[in-house]
Image (cartoon, grey):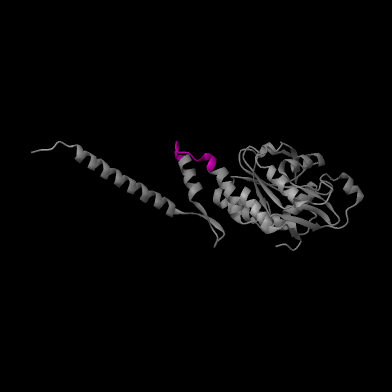
């Protein structure tokens, strides 16, 4: 998994992440190679320029949770302007990449495509959006994003490949807690996927290029089903059941509806009902008048 990824002290990070977000994976720092970086590119490229500090990168990433991400303007792979707020109303999955990366970014995107398919089967085909955003503003043009998407075979109505200017990328990466900087072989950056809620607030950070399906699907379940779950309406009750009973099957790497929980709830209700009937009958018998 770490062929060109410098993995950060996995055991130490895992202990730390378990205290903060149990579902998070270890952090991977991408070291990808695209050749020599010109002085012109360095001068115009936003982002940190000092050496990568793993602890600071993780701290910045975690500090972004709960933060409202600013409504910025981007351009899709056909050059059309779009804003982040256009995607409000459903959860948003954001993945930051650069198109000249030869390993980590393509691997992450391919993996995200596979997990997104699992997620759509679990929570609904159109229940969330995915935004892949190029942060190398000197190279990640709409045409390059189009090629990157086509090479991955990704063409889904709710998956957009976006670019932006340097000011927008600087603001976005700051809001998301995404750390990156130029290196002799391309970029060093934290391998991070961020889930926003339906209002654009950072809800969950997912680390690594090969995370397990529940790391993405569980927060999406909470956002899609949990916010609609209540007992006052039939649809709310159904969403509550779907939240509880849609479980991950590691053997098939898919989510399925687990009827055993409904059966257990039914048996429990019947048992409670039987106990209730017994108590009422016993109470009536104890309070009935005694005949001689």
Is 231 magenta? The answer is yes
Q: Is residue 286 above or below residue 35?
A: above
Question: Toward the viewer: 11 or 24?
Answer: 11
Quarter occupied by residue 80:
top right
Residue at 10% x, 38% y is 291
Task: Look at the image and tell me whether residue 44 can be seen.
Answer: yes
Measured from the top left, where is residue 177 in percent x and y? Answer: 72, 44
Q: How many numbered markers are drawn?
A: 0
Residue at 64% x, 54% y is 15
Magenta extent = 226-234
Q: Quadrant of the N terminus?
A: bottom right
Measured from the top left, where is residue 140 in percent x and y? Answer: 80, 48
Measured from the top left, where is residue 213 in percent x and y? Answer: 60, 55
Quarter occupied by residue 62:
top right
For residue 40, side relative to residue 74 (left or right): right
- Most distant residue in the right direction: 39
For residue 206, side relative to residue 48 (left or right): left
Measured from the top left, where is residue 55 in percent x and y? Answer: 74, 50
- Most distant residue in the left direction: 292
Residue at 75% x, 38% y is 73
Question: Toward the viewer: 287 or 27?
Answer: 287
Task: Look at the image and tell me whether residue 105 can be seen.
Answer: no
Q: Quadrant of the C terminus?
A: top left
Is 146 magenta? The answer is no
Q: Is residue 212 above or below residue 159?
A: below
């Amino acid at each position: 998994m770490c062929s060109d990824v410098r993995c950060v002290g996995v055991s130490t990070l895992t202990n730390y992440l378990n205290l903060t977000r149990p579902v998070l994976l270890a952090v991977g720092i991408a070291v990808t190679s695209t050749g020599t970086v010109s002085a012109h590119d360095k001068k115009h490229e936003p982002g940190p320029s000092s050496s990568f500090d793993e602890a600071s990168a993780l701290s910045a990433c975690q500090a972004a949770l709960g933060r409202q991400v600013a409504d910025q303007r981007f351009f899709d792979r056909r050059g059309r302007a779009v804003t982040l707020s256009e995607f409000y109303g459903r959860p948003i999955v954001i993945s930051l990449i650069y198109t000249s990366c030869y390993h980590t970014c393509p691997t992450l995107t391919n993996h995200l495509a596979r997990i997104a398919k699992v997620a759509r089967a679990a929570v609904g085909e159109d229940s969330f959006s995915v935004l892949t955003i190029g942060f190398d503003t000197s190279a990640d043009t709409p045409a390059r994003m189009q090629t990157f998407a086509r090479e991955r075979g990704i063409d889904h109505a709710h998956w957009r490949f976006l670019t932006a200017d340097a000011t927008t990328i600087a603001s976005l990466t700051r809001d998301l807690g995404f750390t990156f900087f130029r290196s002799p072989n391309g970029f060093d950056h934290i391998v991070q996927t961020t889930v926003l809620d339906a209002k654009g607030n950072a809800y969950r950070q997912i680390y690594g290029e090969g995370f397990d399906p529940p790391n993405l699907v569980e927060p999406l379940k909470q956002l899609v089903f949990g916010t609609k779950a209540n007992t006052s309406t039939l649809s709310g009750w159904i969403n509550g059941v779907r939240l509880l009973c849609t479980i991950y099957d590691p053997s098939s790497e898919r989510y399925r509806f687990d009827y055993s929980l409904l059966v257990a709830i039914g048996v429990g209700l019947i048992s409670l009902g039987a106990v209730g009937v017994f108590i009422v009958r016993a109470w009536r018998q104890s309070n009935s008048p005694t005949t001689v």
